Amino acid sequence: MIKNLWTRLFLEERPSISLSLFRIVIATAVGTYVLPTFFPLKDTYLSTAFKSYNPMFFPVWFLDWIQRSPDWLVWVMVFSFCVVWFFFLIGLFSRISCILTMLGCYYFYALNDFVLGTLTWDILLVTLFLVCVTGYHGDYFSVDALRRNDPDAYRRRRPFFIQRLLQIEIASIYFFTGLHKITVNGNWITGNPIYYLMNLPPEGVTKNFLIKDFMATHPALCYWAGLMIVATELSMPFLLFNRKTRMTGIYLGIVFHITLILTLDVPAIFFFLFPGMLFLFINPEHVLRWVEAKRSFNRQAPRHKLIFDGDCGFCRRSVRYLQIMDLYDTTDMIAYQDVPNLTELHPELSKEKAEKRVYLIEPDGDLSGGFFAFRRFCFLLPMMYPLIVLFFFPGSGVIGPRVYQWVAGHRSLLSFGKKTKQCSI
Amino acid sequence: MKNAKLRNICISVFVAAWLCVFFYESTRYFFLEPLARTVFHVKKLPIFKFLFPPAGWIMFFNVSPEEGEVVVYGIKNGQPYRLDPHEIYPVRFIGFDNIHRGIMGQVLDRRMRRPFCRYLKRKIPYFERFAVTYVYYPSVVKNRYQRREKVIYQCR
């Protein structure tokens, strides 16, 4: 029985799609925390900065070693960190970029605790460590998924233990946070911490939110609010691990963190990381079932059609990538050579036009070509959502078609030797 | 099958080790160490460095009505000017203000005097000297306007 439970908890294989999405969450959390500390560098990490160290977290020999970094090395580390962090975010060489990102975090933390050191930063490091243990986070929503050229990447199954450990981590953090508030040196029963927080001088950690003054004059309300917070934190593991109350736990956690970020000057990772970790409690089997249901629905519904040059290696490869990215299976990819009469697909389409650029025919008959086809495509493929900002950036409507024209004109060069007659136009 | 078995053993060992270390570090400082002191007369238990916060997960676990803040004065021609801590340390993080989190408290440590003075002189060369003071509010609820200010050190 124990063996069965252990297998179900940690060894069972489940889709890794949730963990892949979580990679983006944690990369965003790391980025929003570390990258702003690079401005201005002379005040944060260079020899001119004011620094403090954390000998409780790092051994002294390690701190001494890191402190010997000359300024040029700090610059190199900053540049390297930006590169590996970006790779981690987009899922390029996911595993190694994750490990290097984590090492970068350690480096800057040891270099100056004054800038980074908070309890939430420690939580971020623990989480990042767990994510780095396997490369499962690069299975989908990643450039690695495209490189592997696996159209079924989204349904890849992996041992569930990392996601389970992340679940245990967040549930335990809630629980122990609550426990510390009412035991040992905690004063959430004997004192009235919320009331004190509401009355802090403006330099304190409390933000100036709408009902702050009201709460500052109602100690009883503050006391009960404090007890509610403790009760919420203590009950989180039970809410989250119980199937029937799981969604309540997730919603409660999200509301809790939104309230926290609106009322206190706490690190933004509270907002990025914790809700992301709460979503890890959603069974990836259910996520996959939802995706499959959407795919099945879209297969019956009127479909988008992408018309491309089937004789061009670069175009074929790009279309394969688009197919992998087409999580909801919304689009038929059609080589124009396979259609004898293109006007049957759309009255404005011709062979000459299709040779020059890709075309997207939408179910309602709208036709867009080249850059604008890709712009429409951004809304169809979840992996292309981040590009919406880029494709709709002011001026992109002018620059984008030119860039597309240049790429289309040089696609024979981009085919890496797979030159064909059509590619050489 | 053999590989799957080996993989499962590796995962099981990792999971067991991780859970032990995780819960040990979550409870070490406030629960296990007092217990070890009483039962085994051991002062300190070993720490797993590099991963866990030294005192466990203690967010806002003890908020007292006492409050304090660091105030730095720049002095020019004998005249003190209160400096905005954001001017001293201008790092703004996305979504929160590090200064409000009380990071300036670290400069009160006398060992920080020399590096902090050097930093102030480089950062704000306009002033001839600086005074680092600690403002203490004995109770923000009983008498929120009562404050005591004490010079901790000066930078000449």
Image (tube, coloured by chain):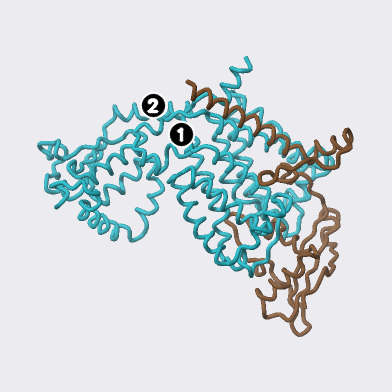
Chain colours: A cyan, B brown
Separation of residues labelled 2 and 1 (CA atoms): 15 Å
Residue at the limit of the structure toward the left, as seen here: A340
Residue in view at x 25 percent, y 59 percent: A402
Disc 1: which residue: A17
Q: Which sits in the foreground, A320 or B21?
A: B21
Residue B148: x and y in percent read: 85, 65
Is A207 displayed left or right of A200 in the figure?
A: left
Q: Chain of mark 2?
A: A
Q: Chain of mark 1?
A: A
The image quarter in which residue B115 lies: bottom right
Residue in view at x 54 percent, y 34 percent: A280
Q: Which sits in the foreground, B24 or A338?
A: B24
Q: Is residue B46 among the parts visible in the rendering?
A: yes
Disc 2: which residue: A293
Q: How many marks?
A: 2
Residue A159: x and y in percent read: 51, 28
Residue in view at x 84 percent, y 41 percent: A190
Residue A32: x and y in percent read: 55, 53
Mark 1 is on which residue type? Answer: Ile
